[in-house]
Image (cartoon, rainbow, N blue to C red):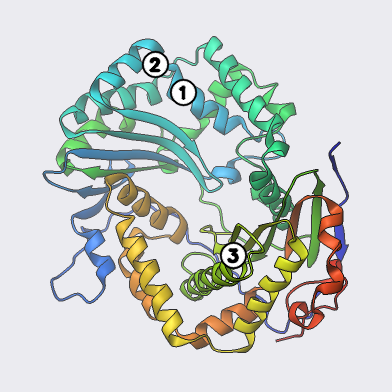
Amino acid sequence: MRALYSVFLFAMLCAACSPRHVTVKPCAENTQPAAQTSAETTDPGMTLLNGVEAFEASGIQVILKRTPGKPVTAAALYIKGGSWNLDATNAGVESMALDLVASGGSVSLPREEMKVALNLMGTNFAAFTQREYSGFALKTIAKNWDASFAIFEDVILHPAFPTDELELERTRQLEFLKGLTEDADRFVMVLAQDLLFAGHAFANRQWGTLEFVGSYSRETLVDYFTSLLTKERLLLVVVGDVTREDLEAKVAGGLGGLPTGTYQAPVAAPFSPAQPHALAAFEADTPTSYLVAMFKAPAPGDVDYPAMLVALELLKMRLFEKIRTKLDLSYAVSAGLAESPSNYGYLYLTSTYPSLALNQIFDEVETMQDWLVNGDDLDRMRNEYLTKSTMGLQSQTAQREMLARYELLYGDWRLAGSSLSAVRAVTPADVRRVMQTYVSNLQLGYYGAASRLSEHLGQIDPAAADRVFMEALGFEGPKAH
C-alpha cells in the first residue's frame, strides 16, 4: 500500500555565491516595426525572424510572421497570467473553462457541427494551459484559413458551455488527478515542485485539485472565462501566408470588440523554497525508483541563462555516456533547464540502484564545478544542440510557439534572433561559474521503495557528493564556493 510520507528537512548548505533573481518586464503591447535582417548578419537565429512584424490590432497585441506560399497556417490566442491568475481556492478553473470552450462549440455552432466542419477542413483547434499562460491554438491549411479563423473567433467569443460536455470534462480531469500517483515520472516532478514552489503562485497548478474540480459549476466557469477575455491579457500570434491587413480586419470584426480591461502583468519576484534542502518521498513498490532534484536557476532573459542552458545540456550528455552507457546504472538519466520567469534546473534519474546512480550524478556535477570542461566536448554538445534547435523550428507551429515564448517569457520576441549566438558565446569558464553558483539547495522528489534509496549508502563516496547534496544521504553539506 502506498503512502505519502513526511517531507524531511535538512541542513542548509553554505553558499558564498547565491543565485541572482531577475524581474521579467511586463509584456507590453508591442508596436515596433517589422524586424529587420540582412544578408550580412552573422547570427543564424535572425533568419528565424524574417517576415515577422508586431503591431496592435483593435487594441490587441499581435505578432505575425508571414510565410508566403506555405500550405499551413498556425495561430494561437494566448491569455497571459497562467498560475498567477489562480489561488488556492480556484486552481483548475482555468484549465476546465478553456477545455470546455474548445470542445463545446458556440451558441450558433453546436459542438458536433463544429467538429464536423473542422474535420472537413483539416483544422485542429484546441485549448492549452501552462504555468505562465494559457490559450487556444489553431492549425489549418492555407486555403481554409478564413473559415477556420471565423470558427476560432466565434467559439472563443460566444462559447456554448454545454452542461453535458462540462460533466465529461470534469470526469476526465478528476480521473487524471486520481491517477497522478500511478504516473511515477509525473508524480516525482510534482513532489519536487511542491518543495521548490511552496508559497509561490506556481504552487497553484492549472490542473487543480479533486476538491475544487469536483465543485465548479457552469456559472463559475462562464464567469471566470469572461473575466479572462480582456484585450490587455491577450496576445495573438500567427505564422502563415496571411497579410497584416487581413488579420487586422478579422480582429476588428471579432476579438477587437472585447473590453480593454485593467490587467497588470505579474512580476517574477524572487522565490525561495521553504528550506534550503528538502526531500519529499512517495513509497511505491515499483521495480525501479525515480528521482528528480530541482534547484533555482537563472530565468529567460537573464545574462546567465545561456550558460546555464549549455552547462546542463553538457551535463546531460556526460550523464548519459557514463551512467547509462558505461555503467548501465540507469535506463533514463538527464539534466535540464526549464523556461520560466521563476526558473529552475533539474537532475533526473530512474534506476534500480538509485543511490549508486545518484552518486555518479554528484561526481559529474562536482567535476564540472571544479574543472573547466573540455573545449572539444563543449563544441560537440553545442553543435548538436544548435542543430537540433534549428531543425525543431521548421514547422509553422514551432515558429509560432517560439515567438510567443520569447514575448511572454523573455519579454521581447526579438530576442529569439540572438538566442543561438548567445549559446555559441558560452565559454568553459562560464559553464564552471554557473555550475558553482546555481547547482545547490536541491529540492528532491523520490518515488519508489524507501529501502532502495539507502541500501547502497555504504558504497557511496562522500567526497563525490560532498559539494552537491545534503545530509539526506548522511553526508556533510557542500563546500562554499
**Residue drawn where x is 45% and y is 32% of the image:** 127
Does any portion of residue 471 appear in the rendered image?
yes
Q: Which residue is mark 3?
A: 324
Question: CB under 8 Å between callouts 3 and 2?
Answer: no
Horizontal relation, residue 369 to residue 373: left or right: right
How far is disc 3 from disc 1 in space, using C-alphas?
44 Å
Q: Which residue is mark 2?
A: 106
Residue 48 x %, y %: 25, 60
Callout 3 secondary element:
helix
Q: Which mark, residue 101? A: 1
The residue carrying pointer 3 sits among few (fewer than 14), some (14 to 19) or many (20 or more) residues within 10 Å by Cα, namely some
Residue 372 x %, y %: 54, 89
The residue nearer to you, when weighing 171 against 405, is: 171
How far is disc 3 from disc 2 in space, using C-alphas?
51 Å
Task: Please report whichever mark, 3 or 2, sits nearer to the chain's N-terminal start.
Answer: 2
Task: Please report whichever mark, 3 or 1, sits nearer to the chain's N-terminal start.
Answer: 1
**Residue drawn where x is 38% and y is 69% of the image:** 384
Residue 51 x %, y %: 18, 55
Task: Please report whichever mark, 1 or 2, sits nearer to the chain's N-terminal start.
Answer: 1
Question: CB under 8 Å between callouts 1 and 2?
Answer: no
Residue 416 x %, y %: 34, 63
Query: Tag 2: residue type?
Result: Ser
Above or below, 204 relative to 214:
below
Query: Tag 1: residue type?
Result: Val
The residue carrying pointer 1 sits among few (fewer than 14), some (14 to 19) or many (20 or more) residues within 10 Å by Cα, namely many
Quadrant of residue 143 in the image?
top left
